[in-house]
């Protein structure tokens, strides 16, 4: 004879409580991971700064992701502790600082993250249309969010103005001119060319690197100018980014003189370049941005990104 349940009310009540609890937990987890209200404070700072920049500057029609990582100090320490091979330590530099990690080979990764946050200093770059900043940058800049705005504007400039492709085209043109010039001046017979093939190849790579570094330094100074322009348009003081250059040079112990093997100019050249730009960029020729511009923000904790998404497409 089958068992009959006389009173199903407790079962229904339990099921109802379970469904409500599960739904609440699911919603809470979704909101935590996907809304800007509960994202880390550093991302909130980025959002506030970029909102102000975008209110007076056209940042294009492409999505621009922002990501915060552990920084190069983490990469160096991971290599020293034998956690990775030299060419494979980039992973630790980009490690998500908002997650908890298990030990690796007995090394406490969470402690390394704390050390990187304290010692790393200011670090930012634009790669594959992503603006990346180390978490330590926010600690170093502290309340000087206007200075942080100059750094963010600099990296935005690389993306918005397609610096990589422009630099590649310029390099291609320079190499072509150099090649044509050499053809006109130097005549090498086929046998001699074969003998010196490796030397010629090495020389070409060396020239390409030198020219590439030269164009990279030029690109960095243009990005400084564009960042200053963005910040001035957004209502910040005219000298903000010039003062920020001195601030970051002191904090990160930049070399005063330019190294021709470096992709970045020295402090003196960089400062002078921006100073000259600001001398010409005044209220009379400043381009105000008045075009209606809309955007929204998308946050994803699992991917550790905050996306600036233009809506004027």
Image (tube, rainbow, N blue to C red):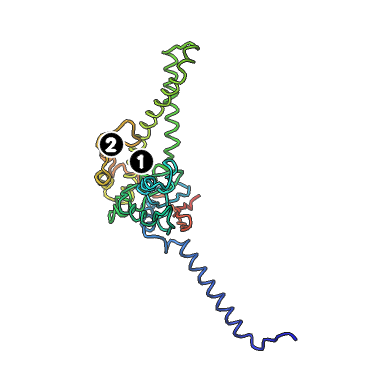
Q: Position of residue 127 (x, y in %)?
A: 43, 43
Q: Residue at x 42, y 17 (%)?
A: 182
The relative height of residue 189 versus residue 248 in the rendered view (above or below) is above
Q: Position of residue 61 (x, y in %)?
A: 47, 47
The single residue placed furthest to the bottom in the displayed view is 6
Q: Report the number of numbered marks.
A: 2
Q: Position of residue 220 (x, y in %)?
A: 35, 38
Q: Position of residue 151 (x, y in %)?
A: 33, 47
Q: Which mark is residue 59?
A: none
Q: Which quarter of the picture shows residue 269?
A: top left
Q: Quadrant of the N terminus?
A: bottom right
The relative height of residue 193 versus residue 71 in the rendered view (above or below) is above
Q: Residue at x 43, y 24 (%)?
A: 202
Few, some or many residues within 10 Å of mark 1 (<14, 14–19, 20+): many
The single residue placed furthest to the right in the displayed view is 1
Residue for badge 2 = 266
Q: Residue at x 41, y 26 (%)?
A: 174
Q: Which mark is residue 223?
A: 1
In the displayed structure, does residue 30 sit left or right of residue 262?
right
**Which numbered disc flags the more N-terminal residue, 2 or 1?**
1
Give the distance between the C-alpha atoms of the residues marked 2 and 1, in whole angstroms: 15 Å
Q: Residue at x 61, y 85 (%)?
A: 9
Is residue 104 or residue 53 the one in the foreground? Answer: 104
Tag 1, which secondary structure? helix
In the displayed structure, does residue 265 sit left or right of residue 2?
left
Tag 2, which secondary structure? loop
Is residue 245 or residue 79 the one in the foreground? Answer: 79
Q: Which quarter of the picture shows residue 265?
A: top left
């Amino acid at each position: 004879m089958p068992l009959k349940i006389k009173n199903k009310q407790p079962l229904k009540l339990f099921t109802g409580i379970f469904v409500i609890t599960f739904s609440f937990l699911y919603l809470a987890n979704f909101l935590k991971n996907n809304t800007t209200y509960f994202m880390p404070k550093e991302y909130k700072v980025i959002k506030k700064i970029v909102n102000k920049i975008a209110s007076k500057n056209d940042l294009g029609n492409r999505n621009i992701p922002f990501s915060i990582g552990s920084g190069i100090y983490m990469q160096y320490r991971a290599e020293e502790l034998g956690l990775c091979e030299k060419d494979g330590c980039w992973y630790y530099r980009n490690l998500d600082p908002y997650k908890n990690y298990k030990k690796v080979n007995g090394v406490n990764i969470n402690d390394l993250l704390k050390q990187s946050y304290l010692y790393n200093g200011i670090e930012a770059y634009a790669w594959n249309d992503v603006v990346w900043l180390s978490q330590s940058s926010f600690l170093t800049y502290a309340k000087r969010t206007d200075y942080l705005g100059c750094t963010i504007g600099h990296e935005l400039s690389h993306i918005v103005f397609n610096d990589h492709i422009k630099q590649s085209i310029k390099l291609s043109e320079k190499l072509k001119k150099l090649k044509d010039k050499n053809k006109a001046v130097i005549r090498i017979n086929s046998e001699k060319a074969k003998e010196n093939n490796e030397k010629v190849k090495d020389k070409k790579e060396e020239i390409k690197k030198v020219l590439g570094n030269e164009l990279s330094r030029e690109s960095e100074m243009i990005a400084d100018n564009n960042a200053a322009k963005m910040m001035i348009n957004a209502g910040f003081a005219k000298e903000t980014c010039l003062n920020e250059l001195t601030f970051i040079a002191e904090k990160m112990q930049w070399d005063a003189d330019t190294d021709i093997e470096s992709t970045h100019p020295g402090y003196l050249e960089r400062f002078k370049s921006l100073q000259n730009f600001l001398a010409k960029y005044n209220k009379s020729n400043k381009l105000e941005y008045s075009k209606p511009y809309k955007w929204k923000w998308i946050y994803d904790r699992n991917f550790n990104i905050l996306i600036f998404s233009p809506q004027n497409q």
